[in-house]
Image (tube, rainbow, N blue to C red):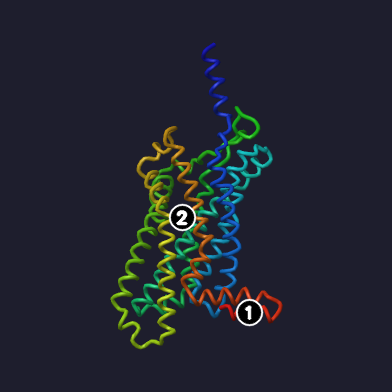
């Protein structure tokens, strides 16, 4: 009799939905979705402004805005919907989410990694400019090729996550808990699951970019200070301002990335060193909230890029204003816009 009661209780726990958490609801669904909508429109404006032939020196930042658009568009259906479906408890919505979340989540991770690589490429280019490097021209001629290679590398490293999880029908449950995600046999192989997925992917996409960008940022600042006199000696005042402005912008973009990813590095290190401890009943709520904060921080960074660009770089500020004014039908409005600039 007691064994039957225990078995029934276990089945009940297995089929029970996670409790609706108000903190997660407001953080992920309300705040996160609002930020993603802001990011969607502001990055669309950035992309239309920077991805032009005469602003090709902002090529990496233009591509970064395209990646941000994709991530902002996917935030609601992928991240926020996970919280929403548990709160509204609609069977058709839950089934729809499980149907598309695997491939879309893999594409989101690919896009996030690609964004990180684009920031790295933009920072390397800025360092080469600051150092007056001989390979700068060659680097600039191959911007498109470098971006394609980084995207393909991101797709291989992160996009393969689509093969790691599959839906399994839970025969003990019906309704909203009828399906559960399980790891595929591929994950349990030593070469893929341990070497590639656990070590290589985490090191290449989290630790290396974080510390490399921190190093490049320091190098740019120290190089600019050391070579400031000789660097600006034969250049016009306007050109000096543009170089300083572009350098300041790059440094601030990297700083915002580093601040947004400090927690991600910490969580990845936790998973790296002792993943099982993160899944215990006592620690899981901390782990879950931290991962939610990481998602919201990332979309917050995307949403504030326009503010960073227009506050740090006069050329982008005027270009953004020019794009906005070009949408005005009346020439009077256009003149007013440029007068304000």
Q: Residues within 10 Å of mark 1 (few under 14, many from 20)?
A: few
Q: CA distance from mark 1 to mark 2?
A: 49 Å
Horizontal and vertical percent for residue 317? 53, 74
**Where is 283 relative to 51, above or below?**
above
Please say if the residues under marks 1 and 2 sit with CB atoms less than 8 Å apart. no
Residue placed under numbered mark 2 in the picture: 157
Q: Is residue 223 left or right of residue 62?
A: left
- In which quadrant is the C terminus drawn? bottom right
Q: Which mark is residue 56?
A: none
Give the image location of residue 324, x and y in percent.
62, 73
Residues 305 and 210: in front is 305
Q: Is the residue 306 above or below the residue 137 in the image?
A: above
Specify the quadrant of the image occupied by residue 138: bottom left
Which residue is more in the foreground, 218 or 109?
A: 218
Q: Residue at x 40, y 82 (%)?
A: 240
Residue 149 at x, y percent in the picture: 47, 66
Residue, disc 1 = 336
Compare residues 310 and 297 and report the one nearer the observer: 310
Mark 1, secondary structure of its residue: helix
Outermost residue on the top side: it is: 1
């Amino acid at each position: 009799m007691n064994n039957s009661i225990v078995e029934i209780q276990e089945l009940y726990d297995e089929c029970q939905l996670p409790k609706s958490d108000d903190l997660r609801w407001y953080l992920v669904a309300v705040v996160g979705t609002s930020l993603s909508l802001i990011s969607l429109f502001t990055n669309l404006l950035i992309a239309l402004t920077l991805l032009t032939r005469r602003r090709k020196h902002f090529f990496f930042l233009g591509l970064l805005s395209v990646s941000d658009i994709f991530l902002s568009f996917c935030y609601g259906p992928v991240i926020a919907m996970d919280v929403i479906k548990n709160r509204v408890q609609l069977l058709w919505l839950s089934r729809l989410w499980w149907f598309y979340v695997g491939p879309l989540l893999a594409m989101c991770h690919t896009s996030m990694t690609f964004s990180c690589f684009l920031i790295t490429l933009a920072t390397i280019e800025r360092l080469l400019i600051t150092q007056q490097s001989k390979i700068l021209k060659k680097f600039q001629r191959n911007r498109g090729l470098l971006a394609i290679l980084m995207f393909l590398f991101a797709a291989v490293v992160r996009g393969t996550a689509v093969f790691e999880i599959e839906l399994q029908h839970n025969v003990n449950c019906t309704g909203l808990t009828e399906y559960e995600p399980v790891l595929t046999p591929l994950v349990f192989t030593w070469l893929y699951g341990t070497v590639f997925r656990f070590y290589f992917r985490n090191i290449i996409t989290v630790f290396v970019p974080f510390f490399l960008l921190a190093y490049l940022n320091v190098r740019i600042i120290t190089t600019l200070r050391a070579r400031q006199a000789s660097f600006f000696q034969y250049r016009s005042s306007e050109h000096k301002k543009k170089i300083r402005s572009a350098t300041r912008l790059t440094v601030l973009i990297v700083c915002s990335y580093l601040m947004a990813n400090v927690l991600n590095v910490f969580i990845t290190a936790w998973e790296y060193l002792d993943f099982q401890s993160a899944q215990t009943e006592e620690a899981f709520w901390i782990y879950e909230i931290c991962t939610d904060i990481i998602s919201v921080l990332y979309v917050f960074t995307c949403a504030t890029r326009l503010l960073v660009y227009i506050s740090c770089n006069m050329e982008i500020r005027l270009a953004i204003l020019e794009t906005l004014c070009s949408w005005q039908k009346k020439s009077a409005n256009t003149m007013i816009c440029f007068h304000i600039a």
